[in-house]
Amino acid sequence: MSVTDNGKVTLSFSDSGIATISFYHPAQNSLPTALLDELTAKITEAGNNSQTRVIVIKSEGDRTFCAGASFDELLQIKDKQAGADFFSGFAKVINACRKSPKIIIARIQGKAVGGGVGLASAADYCLATEAAAIKLSELAIGIGPFVISPAVIRKIGLPAFSQLTIRASDFQTAQWAKEKGLYNEVYPDIASLDSALNELTQKLASYHPEALHGLKEILWEGTSDWDQLLHTRAAISGELVLSEFTQNALQAFLGGKR
């Protein structure tokens, strides 16, 4: 287990070869740099372990899967390099999922916002509950979902991405996310979600590892340029976050939360 001052990431292995990566942050499972780095490391570690058959990514709690970027940390960014470095954390996580040789299943038990939608999009298969509404709120705070957009568009297509981005203040339902292709299965509650997740992962763990690896490569065809692409996008977001508009919007958001 890796623990930061404001959250933790854990990695555990079952006897059947299921690697479970779980993360937690007290601010609605938001992702500061330390957690992004730990997520990247754990995804890579699980994928490189010869005993791993399938990877599950989940968060703790029952209300929010992931609230995206840490707004507190965003307010502390004072130069372009620091901004690019912060958003590169999301790029690293997405690319770790993309390059992992193992199939990744995401367990989405609650709302996913911003980078949380990006994390769900980086998984190969998503199981969610009816409570797992999604929102890309970046435009509302003066930035855009530039780093995660390739992953999101890959899953739901450009028209749905446009709606999700332009309707930055509105949540879309879990059923909407399923209809558009982000979620593969939606369940009424966490108990039924976990039952389905256990059944699916046990089946996948019994399949031929090389067949699963071959499927993984097919699922991610045409994305070999993402190492450079996502880091270029991170620089765009890193510059926008320095603007007076964005700083004021972040302050107003945090002020309303406290």
Image (cartoon, grey):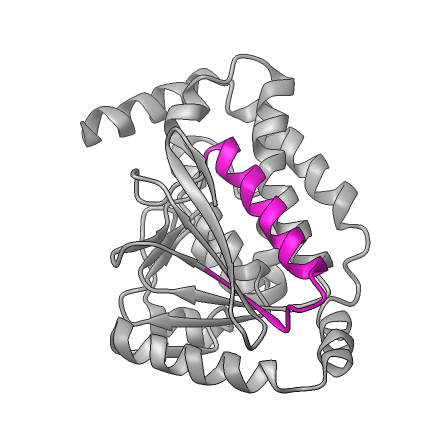
Q: Is residue 150 visible?
A: no
195 to 255, vertically: above or below: below
Q: Is residue 118 visible?
A: yes
Q: Is 50 in the magenta?
A: yes
Identify the residue at horizontal 55%, vertical 41% (top origin). 38
Q: Is 80 in the magenta?
A: no
**At which x and y percent is residue 90?**
58, 42
Image quarter of the C terminus: top left
Identify the residue at horizontal 28%, vertical 55% (top origin). 61
**At which x and y percent is residue 36?**
53, 40
Toward which corner of the image does residue 257 lie, by quadrant?
top left
**At which x and y percent is residue 111?**
32, 57
251 to 100, vertically: above or below: above
120 to 231, vertically: above or below: below
Query: Outermost residue toward the front?
Result: 15
**At which x and y percent is residue 109?**
33, 64
Toward which corner of the image does residue 67 lie, by quadrant?
top left
Identify the residue at horizontal 59%, vertical 73% (top origin). 17
The chief SS type of the magenta part is helix
237 to 215, vertically: above or below: above
Q: Which residues are magenta?
A: 32-57
Apparent side of residue 240 relative to residue 185 in the rendered image (left or right)? right
* Front-most of residues 161 and 185: 185
